[in-house]
Image (spheres, rainbow, N blue to C red):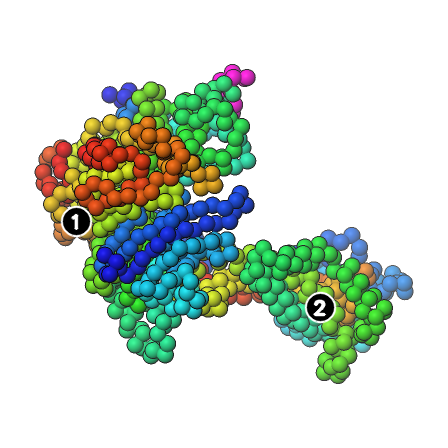
């Protein structure tokens, strides 16, 4: 696995200094990503999924954030690289798509200019007309009709879905190895979301990139991810293949997420399963397992849930890992039950 | 039969003027945000309204609560046309019709305590005798699952889900019969979303409320609605019992919408037959002639461009505005229930 | 775009007509008889009567206004015979206090005001935007706090106070500069600079304060925009991001206010000109007020209005250039 991995994250921790004290947004996160793989990161607000994404491009504000651990991109540690090195990686080897396409584009320049800019910053001295034809090519690839005309238009002349295509064109013009998509379809309508997810899948095949897809939508995860990290309060609580997550989730938080999802065929109109309470404040995290105040199964944890932080361990036969104190048998049977419900 | 109707919208139209002529600046165009929508909500039931951005669902919400005046058409609340009321009559009637908003935070005054926010409508409308406002407010807080001791706290001290509970308590204060909820859960995390949906369902059972529930999330609407109206570019294209609309959609747009929803549960994923709409929703300033969906519809013919389909029952009894409704049963990515 | 400009200019002319009308109403509304003001202590009833006819004050208000308007386009003749004189187009009336055509007076004083305004404007834009940018780039550090102190002082201290203080300390106490005495820059450039440097600086530093605040807040706001993050994610250098992404956005409100401020200054920097004894339009207006020299007041008010209205049009055009979203197609 590690032989083919293009990105390895080892013990990544990110702490922010705030007026109320230090907040640990991401705590000892590790994962590997292979070319062609799509890794989904699921979690609620405050789970640390977006901070993880911006750490990989070193976009966190350096004055308030302390980042430790290793982020290895084909062997180069991004966290210790010089500013020049990081800049040569950003947008070239690792590119990013943001949630809100309406605000992600610079309103003062044409879309053509902005796509070209992303190329030119990593390819100096390329002839303008060559760049322009590359940009037109890319616009065609991401499905923008009539690119010759639209290349000279401004972002506000495009619809939300078209703007997200432009953002994707900017991200992919340098054929990056890793694409980080932070809630790429959350702001879009459902029919447009479907178009964008299809587009990402087909471009992934064409360019053989690795994708990190950050979302709160389990439906999106189910459609495009190969493997999934479930995050809660800055920590990974479960890692699974996508099929395992839905067949045999291995963490009580994941059980709850699956139960809370509304479905297109909820014909009985019963009550939804809920997770009681709200995600904790990062400033005053619960002791032991951060999820224990909301967990239905604390009583099965031999009293460790309140005092000991659970380590990630492998579990079951489907290659999943969990950070939960419950015994393997209990988790697996609860998980199967949750998946059937 | 009419006695069972909580809310009725008749041929509602709302045009927003836009654009300016070259010299005098008079509007030359209008956005046809809502263009002839008729709906009914039975007492104690939920009407879900789904559609993509720009379909007019939020404008419709503001029309039926009369936050804005319609260009034409009427809204009957318990048989009374609220579009012609004014002054104290309007205030008295509108009490019965409350709204819950998408963003609980921006709809709560940050400088008022929760107690003030919830009790204010009580005082203004004289719902309870003087001196009993606080008791009633705490009762309301308890009912929506807030700790009544937090009476003196301010909105920023609450999480998103709790703020939405505050918004619900405030709406309930006036003892409404109808609640219009505009995307009430779309800003919330999944686990919180489920809590709020359950709360709304319980309140409906206990208080006999009627809901107009507007959302872009089809599965949320499926969960909570009895009737579903699908809107496209200011018009209702299909309406019917939720179970029918979701299991045997008649309008191609409904079908495409359902097919586009990413499905979490593997059991619901079907044979992989997917409908992918091309392009974007056209501008409501200059909607396509005939059927408004025809520019994105794979079934469109010349007839669709010439003649606008009317919303009427088809052979299978489904109420749909389409010249070529889907046959029953359709094979979607969804298992028919 | 062309139609947009034509339409704006058309409205500007209409607006100026309205302004001129209401300004001219000063004449009609004032309780004083303008003719009685024309001769001061030497007034005798027959002189007043003669002046009234000569200057046209015997006519009805509308007729007077019409003659005034006509004068702007074709010039105006006053009186007849030996006492006759004329003011060439564009005539803004005749100053009975200074016995001179108002247009001539403005032509004499306007250059002083223009030199003052242009110099101060350039300085204050450089200081204001520069300090604001430094504050934004060092948010929360000492540079930011120093800039914030600077803006508080700048917006709270009145010009006449600072002006007199600077004049006193630099000229009278430290004797670094000679006492200000205006000379044309073409006749005596050194004396011109020596006179202008203090008013330029005082005006610039005090006006720069609000620009510092605008620049700082505008840049900080822009730095939080998603599109700036995308710029960083593209691998652009900070320099490029500041120029193409941050400043471009922060400049938009600044352009609006700068245009109006500059135009206001061109109408006469009354206090600064008075403190530093500069023979500009502002000081002339003050004198006209004191002497009830109504035609001069009407003339300078109208000129100031022209600048403000023109600046508005230019700002709108600049806006369309800076922000493609408001560009009219």
Q: Residue at x 22, y 62 (%)?
A: A208
Q: Secondary structure at mark 1?
A: loop
Label 1 environment density (alpha carbons within 10 Å; few <14, some 14–19, many ≥20): some
- The location of residue C278, given as percent across then percent down, is 77, 70
Q: Chain of mark 1?
A: B
Q: Is residue B146 above or below residue B129?
A: below
Q: Of helix, strand and loop, which mostly describes the magenta segment?
A: loop
Q: Residue at x 43, y 26 (%)?
A: B146
- The location of residue C87, given as percent across then percent down, is 71, 74
- The location of residue A239, given as percent across then percent down, is 27, 46
Asked if the magenta segment contains residue B128, the reply would be yes
Q: Which residue is mark 2?
A: C201
Tell me which segment is drawn in magenta. B123-133
Question: Mark 1 to mark 2: distance in Å?
Answer: 69 Å
Q: Chain of mark 2?
A: C
Q: Is residue B256 above or below residue C210?
A: above
Q: Secondary structure at mark 2?
A: helix
Residue B251 left/right relative to A258:
left
Q: Which residue is mark 1?
A: B275
Residue C23, located in which quarter of the rendered image?
A: bottom right
Residue B266 left/right relative to A53:
left
């Amino acid at each position: 696995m590690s032989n083919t991995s293009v990105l390895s994250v080892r013990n990544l921790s990110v702490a922010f200094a705030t007026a109320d004290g230090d907040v640990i947004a991401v705590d000892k996160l590790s994962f590997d990503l292979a070319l062609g793989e799509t890794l989904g990161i699921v979690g609620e607000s405050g789970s640390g999924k977006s901070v993880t994404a911006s750490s990989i491009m070193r976009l966190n504000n350096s004055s308030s954030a302390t980042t430790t651990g290793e982020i290895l991109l084909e062997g180069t540690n991004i966290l210790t690289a010089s500013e020049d090195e990081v800049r040569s990686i950003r947008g070239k080897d690792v590119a990013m798509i943001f949630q809100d396409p309406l605000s992600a584009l610079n309103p003062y320049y044409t879309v053509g200019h902005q796509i070209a800019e992303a190329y030119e910053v990593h390819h100096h001295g390329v002839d303008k007309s060559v760049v322009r034809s590359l940009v037109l090519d890319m616009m065609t690839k991401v499905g923008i009709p009539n690119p010759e005309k639209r290349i000279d238009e401004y972002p506000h002349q495009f619809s939300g879905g078209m703007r997200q295509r432009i953002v994707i064109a900017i991200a992919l013009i340098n054929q990056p190895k890793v694409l980080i998509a932070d809630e790429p379809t959350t702001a879009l309508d459902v029919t447009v979301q479907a178009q964008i997810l299809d587009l990402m899948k087909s471009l992934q095949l064409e360019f053989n990139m690795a994708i990190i897809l950050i979302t709160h939508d389990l439906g999106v995860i189910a459609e495009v991810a190969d493997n999934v990290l479930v995050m809660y309060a800055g920590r990974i609580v479960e890692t699974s293949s996508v099929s395992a997550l839905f067949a045999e989730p291995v963490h009580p938080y994941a059980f709850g997420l699956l139960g809370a999802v509304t479905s297109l065929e909820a014909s009985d109109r019963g009550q939804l399963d809920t997770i009681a309470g709200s995600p904790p404040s990062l400033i005053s995290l619960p002791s032991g397992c951060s999820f224990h105040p909301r967990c239905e199964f604390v009583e099965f944890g031999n009293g460790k849930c309140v005092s000991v932080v659970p380590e990630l361990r492998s579990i079951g036969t489907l290659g999943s890992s969990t950070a939960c104190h419950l015994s393997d048998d209990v988790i697996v049977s609860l998980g199967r039950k949750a998946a059937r419900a | 039969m009419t006695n069972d109707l909580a809310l009725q919208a008749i041929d509602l139209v709302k045009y927003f003027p836009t654009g300016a002529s070259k010299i005098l600046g008079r509007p030359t165009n209008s956005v046809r945000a809502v263009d002839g929508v008729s709906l009914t909500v039975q007492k104690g039931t939920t009407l879900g309204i789904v559609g993509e951005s720009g379909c007019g669902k939020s404008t419709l919400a503001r029309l039926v609560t009369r936050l804005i005046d319609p260009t034409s058409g009427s809204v009957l609340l318990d048989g009374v046309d609220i579009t012609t009321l004014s002054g104290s009559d309007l205030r008295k009637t509108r009490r019965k019709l409350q709204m819950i908003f998408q963003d609980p935070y921006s709809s709560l005054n940050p400088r008022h305590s929760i107690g003030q926010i919830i009790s204010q409508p009580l005082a203004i409308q004289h719902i309870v005798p003087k001196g009993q406002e606080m008791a009633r407010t705490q009762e309301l807080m308890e009912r929506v699952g807030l700790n009544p001791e937090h009476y003196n706290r301010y909105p920023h001290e609450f999480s998103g889900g709790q703020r939405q509970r505050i918004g619900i308590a405030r709406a309930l204060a006036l003892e409404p019969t109808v609640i219009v909820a505009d995307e009430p859960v779309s800003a919330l995390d999944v686990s919180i979303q489920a809590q709020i949906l359950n709360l709304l369902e319980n309140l409906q059972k206990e208080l006999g409320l009627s809901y107009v529930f507007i959302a872009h999330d089809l599965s949320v609407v499926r969960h909570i609605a009895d009737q579903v109206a699908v809107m496209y570019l200011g018009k209702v294209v299909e309406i019917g019992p939720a179970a029918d609309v979701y299991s045997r959609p008649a309008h191609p747009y409904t079908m495409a919408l359902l097919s586009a929803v990413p499905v979490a549960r593997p059991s619901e994923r079907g044979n992989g037959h997917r409908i992918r709409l091309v392009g974007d929703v056209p501008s409501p300033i200059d909607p396509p002639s005939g059927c408004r969906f025809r520019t994105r519809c794979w079934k469109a013919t010349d007839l669709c461009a010439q003649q606008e389909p009317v919303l009427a029952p088809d052979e299978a009894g489904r109420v749909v505005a389409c010249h070529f409704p889907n046959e029953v049963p359709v094979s979607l990515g969804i298992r028919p229930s | 775009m062309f139609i947009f400009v034509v339409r704006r200019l058309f409205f500007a002319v209409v607006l100026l007509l309205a302004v001129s009308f209401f300004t001219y109403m000063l004449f009609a509304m004032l309780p004083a008889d303008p003719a009685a003001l024309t001769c001061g202590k030497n007034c005798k009833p027959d002189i007043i009567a003669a002046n009234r006819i000569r200057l046209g004050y015997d006519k009805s208000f509308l007729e007077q206004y019409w003659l005034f308007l006509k004068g702007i386009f074709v010039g105006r003749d006053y009186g007849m015979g030996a006492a006759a004189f004329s003011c060439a187009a564009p005539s803004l009336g005749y100053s009975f206090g200074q016995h001179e055509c108002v247009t001539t007076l403005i032509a004499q004083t306007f250059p002083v005001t223009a030199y003052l305004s242009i110099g101060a404007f350039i300085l204050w834009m450089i200081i204001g935007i520069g300090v604001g940018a430094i504050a934004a780039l060092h948010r929360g550090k000492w540079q930011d706090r120093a800039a914030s102190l600077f803006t508080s002082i700048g917006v709270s201290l009145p010009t006449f106070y600072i002006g007199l203080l600077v004049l006193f300390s630099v000229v009278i106490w430290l004797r670094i500069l000679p006492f200000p005495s205006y000379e044309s820059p073409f006749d005596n450039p050194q004396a011109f600079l020596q006179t202008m440097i203090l008013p330029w600086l005082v005006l610039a530093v005090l006006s720069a304060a609000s620009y510092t605040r605008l620049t700082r807040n505008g840049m900080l706001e822009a730095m939080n925009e998603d599109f700036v993050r995308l710029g960083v994610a593209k691998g652009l250098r900070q320099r490029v991001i500041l120029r193409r992404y941050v400043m471009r956005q922060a400049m938009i409100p600044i352009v609006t206010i700068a245009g109006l401020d500059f135009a206001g200054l061109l109408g006469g920097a009354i206090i600064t000109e008075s403190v530093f004894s500069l023979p500009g339009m502002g000081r002339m207006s003050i004198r006209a007020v004191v002497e009830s020299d109504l035609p001069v007041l009407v003339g300078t008010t109208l000129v100031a209005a022209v600048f403000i209205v023109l600046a508005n049009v230019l700002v709108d055009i600049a806006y369309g250039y800076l922000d493609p979203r408001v560009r009219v197609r």
